[in-house]
Image (cartoon, rainbow, N blue to C red):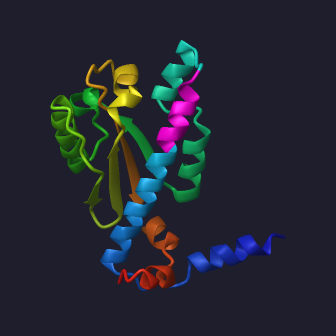
Amino acid sequence: MDTSKILGTMEDYKVKRVSPAQIAYQVEVMGSEITKALTVDFEKQMKNANQARIEEICQLKNMQLIDSLSEQYNLKVRLLGQPDIGSNNQLYAKEREVLEAYADNAAKKVNVGDNIQKIGDSLFVYTSQIPYEKGVGKLCFSDDTGFAIWSIVLRKSEVVKSINVVKLRDKNIK
């Protein structure tokens, strides 16, 4: 029996007192780390991929990193581009608004920073633009602007579980 795993699970169920600022900070940290890792993995997977594999990658199929992150943090990863604005009915309203803003700025070749939106009481959507020079938008969405973003849907409960309150207090995040 793996007692360290049991202890980790027990730690997850401990009551934690966390502030909205600590939650927002943790969403930003998690989202940033995840999107950076996804971009690196995406690039690596695309190298020397045949057309069938490229289509799979653009649909985020058979992506070990995404599967692992989804399982570990109970999150949803989406790769979004221009076509999703009008046709993707699974987007949250705020997510669609952010996507439209990213698209407007992409048309002007303006880089936009990452964005966090709170959806109800239990979800956060972290969005991050994939740099144009990566060519993901052109490759996956046939968009000459190269526009594409990562959208990470995080559950508040999972974010809270991942917070180390002592470390955040040491960083003066209260």
| Quarter residue 111 falls in | top left
Quarter of the picture containing the N terminus is bottom right
Quarter of the picture containing the C terminus is bottom left
| Quarter residue 132 falls in | top left
Q: Residue 124 magenta-drawn?
A: no
Q: Pinpoint residue 28: horizontal percent, then vertical percent.
A: 37, 61
Residue 40 in view (yes/no) = yes
Q: Pinpoint residue 145: horizontal percent, then vertical percent.
A: 26, 24
Report the residue at 29% width, 21% height from top. 143
- In the foreground, 83 or 45: 45
Total marks shown come to 0
Tell me: residue 112, above or below residue 15: above
Tell me: residue 67, above or below residue 154: above
Q: Pinpoint residue 148: horizontal percent, then vertical percent.
A: 33, 33
22 relative to 97 in the view: left or right: right
Report the residue at 29% width, 57% height from top. 116
Q: Residue furthest top?
A: 51
Report the residue at 27% width, 36% height from top. 89
Q: Residue furthest right?
A: 1
Q: Pinpoint residue 74: horizontal percent, then vertical percent.
A: 51, 56
55 relative to 145 in the view: left or right: right
- In the foreground, 90 or 108: 108
93 relative to 167 in the view: left or right: left
Residue range of the region highlighted in magenta in the rendering: 38-47
Q: Residue 41 magenta-drawn?
A: yes
Report the residue at 46% width, 29% height from top. 59
Residue 61 in view (yes/no) = no
From the image, give the main secondary structure of the stretch colored magenta: helix
